């Protein structure tokens, strides 16, 4: 594994986004919590790909890429990969709706505290896992 400056930059951006989740939750901007959590998880997983020497694709859910390169992941990430993939996939599905909505889906009306809490919990799990894995192997 190679933890370079760009990888560290992704981690720092993710940490800042995590702090922002609390701000959005406190201000009842629950759809923004979901959107920012997705971006945060995406950054973290692309940092992992970068650290193992894999070019991150220009897609929002890189779970399949992580699976494809599972043998190169640190043990902790291998252990938690199934849960991380589920989180990434779920948040990816919410990405556009939480930001733009649709004619019959107004994000500020559709997302609630429970959605925000789940997004924060999932984002924190991925953040802690990636930080620990990269620290041990970087």
Image (cartoon, rainbow, N blue to C red):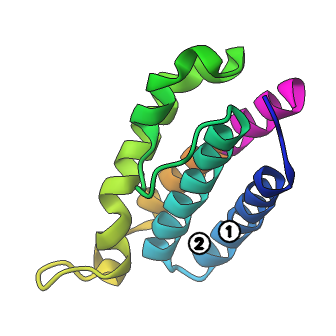
- Pick the front one: 118 or 40: 40
Mark 2 element type: helix
Residue 41 location in percent, x, y? 57, 51
Give the residue number, with chain letter if any, for mark 2.
Answer: 25
Residue 94 location in percent, x, y? 33, 61
Residue 88 visible from this viewpoint: yes
Report the quarter where the C terminus lies.
Answer: top right
Report the quarter where the N terminus lies.
Answer: top right
Residue 27: name its quadrant: bottom right
Looking at the magenta stretch, what is its main secondary structure? helix
Give the residue number, with chain letter if any, for mark 1.
Answer: 22
The residue positioned 83% from the left and 53% from the top of the image is 8
Q: Residues within 10 Å of mark 1 (few under 14, many from 20)?
A: some
Q: Is residue 63 left or right of residue 43?
A: left
Q: Residues within 10 Å of mark 2 (few under 14, many from 20)?
A: some
The residue positioned 85% from the left and 47% from the top of the image is 4
Residue 125 visible from this viewpoint: no
Mark 1 element type: helix
Q: Magenta span covers which residues?
A: 127-138
Residue 78: name its quadrant: top right
């Amino acid at each position: 594994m190679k933890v370079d400056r760009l990888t560290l930059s992704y981690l720092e951006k993710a940490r800042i986004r995590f702090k922002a989740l609390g701000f959005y939750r406190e201000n009842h901007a629950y759809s923004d919590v979901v959107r920012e959590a997705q971006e945060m998880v995406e950054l973290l997983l692309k940092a992992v790909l970068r650290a193992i020497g894999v070019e991150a694709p220009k897609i929002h859910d890189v779970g399949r890429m992580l699976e494809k390169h599972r043998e190169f992941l640190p043990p902790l990430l291998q252990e938690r990969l199934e849960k991380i993939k589920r989180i990434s996939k779920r948040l990816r599905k919410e990405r556009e709706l939480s930001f733009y909505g649709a004619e019959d889906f107004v994000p500020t009306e559709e997302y609630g505290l429970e959605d925000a809490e789940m997004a924060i919990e999932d984002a924190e799990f991925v953040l802690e896992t990636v930080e620990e894995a990269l620290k041990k192997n970087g």
